[in-house]
Every structure is written in structure tokens, then in C-alpha cells.
Amino acid sequence: MLKYITLRLVMIPFLLVGVATVVFILFQFTPGDPISARFGLRISDFSPAQLERMREDLGLNDPIPVQYFRYIGNLMRGDLGISITSRRPVLEEILSRMPATLELALTSILLVTLLSVPLGFMAATWRGSILDNATTSLALVGFSMPSFWLGIMFILLFSIQFNVLPTSGRGEGIILNRLNHLVLPTLTLSLGLIGYNARIVRSAVLEVQNMDYVMTARSKGLKERQVLFRHILPNVLIPIVTVLGLQFAGLLGGAVIIEMIFAWPGIGRLAVNAVFRRDYPIILGTTIFFSAIYIVVNLIIDILYSVIDPRIRLE
């Protein structure tokens, strides 16, 4: 197992270089000029010589292979470049936004886990009941509503109509104020996932419940609680961990729209703003950062497999 983990860790830099290469090539076919995007209408305030000097300073006039190998070389040293718009190191920009994104993702995945797993178990235990039908309806409704629409509806209802929760921002000062700002984006991110995960847990429990070893355990007279915790729960944890792990990685890297709607100062918002401004170093840096998150989360999931089920060996 140690050999497997070491090999996966060694592969991470190569995977990130591959991601950086693909994104870098795609940028070469993207229309627009970073300098023009940076200054917008104000670009007429600069002379052609000044603009040329800026491009020279940013290395944009160098041949593409030179730009590529310079970027990869810096990447291997942990240097993601300098933001064109803010002139700050990209890594510093990303790390400064990381706490906000991490806070939102952790709160959302915690809420999803605490609600979806018990709901799924209860829906499977009382199959065909009102609770089971309600879980199915929640999953259907949650996935039918686009997250951006749901976020806007929450703002209209709780912020404008009832004026009980803030519309945007992360909040400052006392903890209660920060929690108030966290409620709406967390609910927007979590609602669909709660129903979806509850259905996955329900299906996994129903499948395991019909296994021979579970029926044998029941025939021996074990109490239902013992059957649940000894035989059913360990065998449904693997799909649950897989789904939750990938969703957590997705929340860290993919809550872009929600961060924009609620003006949440996270990495997703940083990436979207960088796209509008043609800030290539930021776009490349956030893409590589999101890829690294997926790779690390997948490795953690693989390790958890062997912890949950000792029959699984990582080689």
C-alpha cells in the first residue's frame, strides 16, 4: 500500500504538467489580448510603445515554445506566475481565497452527509413509505432546479421578501454574522446533493439487504441494529465515500456559479473574473489547483477503500 501511495504521489507533478500543457495550448487558440482586457476602454490612454513594453514585460512577445517551457519550469518550482491584473503572485491570490472556498465546501458537504445518509437508510428501511416517496421527490426536485436559479430564488425570498438573511458576501466580525452569510450559499449547493445522495444510499442499502450474509445474520437472531452496523453499514460505505469525496472535490473547484451569485470571495469567483479579464496566469493557476484537488481527493478515496474494506488491497 505504501508503494502504491508513493507511486501516486510521484505521478501528481506529471499529471499537473499534462493539465497545464492542455490548458496552455487551448489558450493559444483563444481570441483576445490580456493587455486589452486588462485596461478595457482605458487602453487608448496608452501609447503603442507603452503597450508594447507591457507585453514585453509580461513575456507575451516571446515565441510560444519559450513561454510554454518557461511556465512549466516555473510550475515545477511551485511558481504559478504573476497575475496580469493585480500584479500579485498567482499562488498568493489562490491561497488568499482558499479559506472562503474551503469554508463553503466543508459546510455544504457536512450538511449533505448529515442529512442524506440517515435519509437514505430510513428510506430503504421503510421502503414505499411517505418518507421514501419524499426522498425520491426531494432528489427529483433538487436535480430539476438549476443551482443559479435556486440561489436567486433564495435571495428573493429570504433576503428581499423577508429580509432575514444577507444577499451576498462572506460577512465580517462576530460569528453569527458570518454564519448568516453562509446559510444561503450552503443551502443552494446542498439541496440537490442531499436528495441525490439519499437515493444512492437507499439503493446501496437495498442491494446489501438482500445479500446472503445479511439474511444469514438475521436468521441467527441478531438484532436489526446489529445487522445494520456490523453487516450493512460497512458494505455501503464505499459508494457513499466515493460519491461524497468526488462531490467535495467538485464543491472546492466547481462552486463557481454560486460564488458569483452570492459574491462569495472564493477561488471560483477568482477564476471567473480572470476569464473576463483574460488573466491567463490566474486561469492556468486555478485550473491546475482544481486538478490537484481532484487528484489528491481521488487518492484519499482509494486509501479509504482499503481502510473500510480490508479485502481491497492497493497495489
Image (cartoon, grey):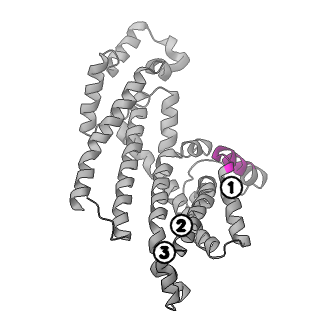
> From the viewer's perspective, is the residue at label 1 or at label 2 nearer?
2
Which circle's residue, 3 or 2, is located before the other in the chain? 2
Residue 89: tell me if it is visible.
no
In the image, taking residue 57 as reference, residue 177 lies left or right, namely right
Which circle's residue, 1 or 2, is located before the other in the chain? 1
Vertical placement of 63 versus 114: above or below?
A: above
Examine the structure image and report whether residue 145 is included in the region drawn in magenta.
yes
In the image, taking residue 257 as reference, residue 167 lies left or right, namely right
Q: CA distance from mark 1 to mark 2?
A: 18 Å
Q: In this view of the protein, which residue sits in the foreground, 39 or 292?
A: 292
Which quarter of the picture shows residue 200?
bottom right
State yes or no: discs 3 and 2 in contact (Cβ < 8 Å): no
- Measuring from the top left, give residue 20's x and y in whole percent: 34, 34
Residue type marked 2: Ala
Q: Which residue is mark 3?
A: 233
Mark number, residue 204: 2
- Measuring from the top left, give residue 93's x and y in whole percent: 40, 40
State yes or no: discs 1 and 3 in contact (Cβ < 8 Å): no
* SS category of the residue bearing label 2: helix
- Measuring from the top left, give residue 304's x and y in whole percent: 37, 64
Which quadrant does the N terminus fall into? bottom left
Residue lying farthest to the front in this orientation: 212
Label the magenta part by its dominant secondary structure. Answer: helix
Which circle's residue, 1 or 3, is located before the other in the chain? 1
Q: Which residues are magenta?
A: 144-156
Residue type marked 3: Leu
> From the viewer's perspective, is the residue at label 3 or at label 2 nearer?
2
Mark number, residue 140: 1
Q: CA distance from mark 1 to mark 3?
A: 25 Å
